[in-house]
Amino acid sequence: MKNLSVLGSTGSIGCNVLSIVQKFPRQFTVKALAAGSNINLLARQIEQFSPELAVVIDQQRVRQLNDLLPAGHGVQILHGQKGYQVAAAHEGVDMTVGAMVGAAGLQPALAAIEAGKTLALANKETLVMAGDYVMARAAKKKVDILPIDSEHSAIFQCLQGQRRQDLERILLTASGGPFLNRPRGEFAGITPDEALQHPNWKMGPKITIDSATLMNKGLEVLEAKCLFGVSHEKIQVVIHPQSVVHSMVAYQDGSVMAQLGIPDMKTAIAYALSYPRRLPLEQPLPRFDDDLALTFKAPDFEKFSCLKLAMGACETGGTLPAVLNAANEVAVHAFLDKGIGFLDIARIIAAAMDSHAVVHRPDLADILEADQWARRRAQEEIKRLQS
């Protein structure tokens, strides 16, 4: 029996994690659940999985959750960043699932590592912001970080049983999002509703917008660089609209290994939860008997400038990835609120990156300071664009 703490339990990844727990009740139990403001769903999850601890974003949600739960429910309820860190390091937990959205997931992930918990990581921002620091702490604590992202899970699987020195290149696939074939000249009129219509994947709003701008793929490059200990030159983004090949690894003898599957996060999640075993998920296979065509092409960095910005941050390193991530979070939120246009997302990120004094070899305080600075700078740029 593996005891889990699920951070971000009401998001798309968290709900998929809990669906696997429900399917395999003899293999997993839930000790802690942490959510944001979706209190109604969290209350139903508590009723179903009976955790010892639940965490919400603020004191107001604590009161709301208590009102929804039966009297004498016996669940300890905490709130805020300290509460998330307590849930991540909760006693008796074997694995912490990091599925929170954005920079808020960094400190809980570090708390899990410091407590010696295996970390199943979906929150890519943790490694985007502070990858070198996080990986160093995990190595010191001898903590395994297992990827949940489908692309990083695919790479992880393709590396199993291979000599790392034989690695030639990581081929990170991207669907291209909803605007792959839309002319750049029409991007200015893209609405949030259009950008939220991903052709292959069902995800939360923030990551869906990131997929539309291809920033998500840039964040994944930064994550892969740290997670697999490779230089940015060894990571290549490949557009693959069918989302059947989740990623590939090329070796120095010319061999390329790929991991394939339907576009469903459950496979990658289950592999992280049960590693090194595989669970009988009863997932359908890709329709190889149905004239399945797999196509690949290079990304257009000029058309999708967010990807270009992320690749630049990956090459520069230091605090610049944290600035990229923070400015993107602010810009995406403003776009979803219809305060800026689709093309303004990249403009805001570029403005923050261009005016940032990069700290090389930063410590955690430097990274957190850069994150907060970038958020202020992004807000300034939004106000300028709106004036």
Image (cartoon, helix red, strand yellow):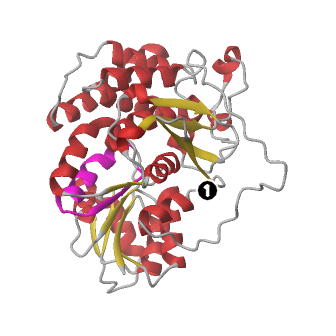
The residue that appears at 45% across and 54% down in the rendered structure is: 148
Residue 366 image offset from top left, x and y in percent: 17, 31
Q: Is residue 283 left or right of residue 2?
A: right
Q: Is residue 190 left or right of residue 345?
A: right
**Residue 355 position by quadrant:** top left
37 part of magenta stretch:
no
Quick check: 142 above or below 188?
A: below
Farthest residue, direction front:
253
The residue that appears at 35% across and 35% down in the rendered structure is: 230
How many residues crowd around disc 1 within 10 Å: few (fewer than 14), some, or many (20 or more)?
Answer: some
**Residue 47 position by quadrant:** bottom left
Q: Which residues are magenta?
A: 102-122
* Residue 327 in view of the camera: no
* Residue 166 in view of the camera: yes
The overriding secondary structure of the stretch rendered in magenta is: helix
Viewer-nearest residue: 35 or 178 = 178
The residue that appears at 32% across and 21% down in the rendered structure is: 377
Q: Which residue is mark 1?
A: 264
Q: How many marks?
A: 1
Where disc 1 sits, the SS reads loop
Q: Is residue 336 left or right of residue 66?
A: right
Instruction: Name the quarter where the N terminus is drawn.
Output: bottom left
**Residue 92 position by quadrant:** bottom left
Residue 161 image offset from top left, x and y in percent: 42, 55
Amino acid found under the numbered disc labelled 1: Asp
Q: Is residue 262 left or right of residue 116?
A: right
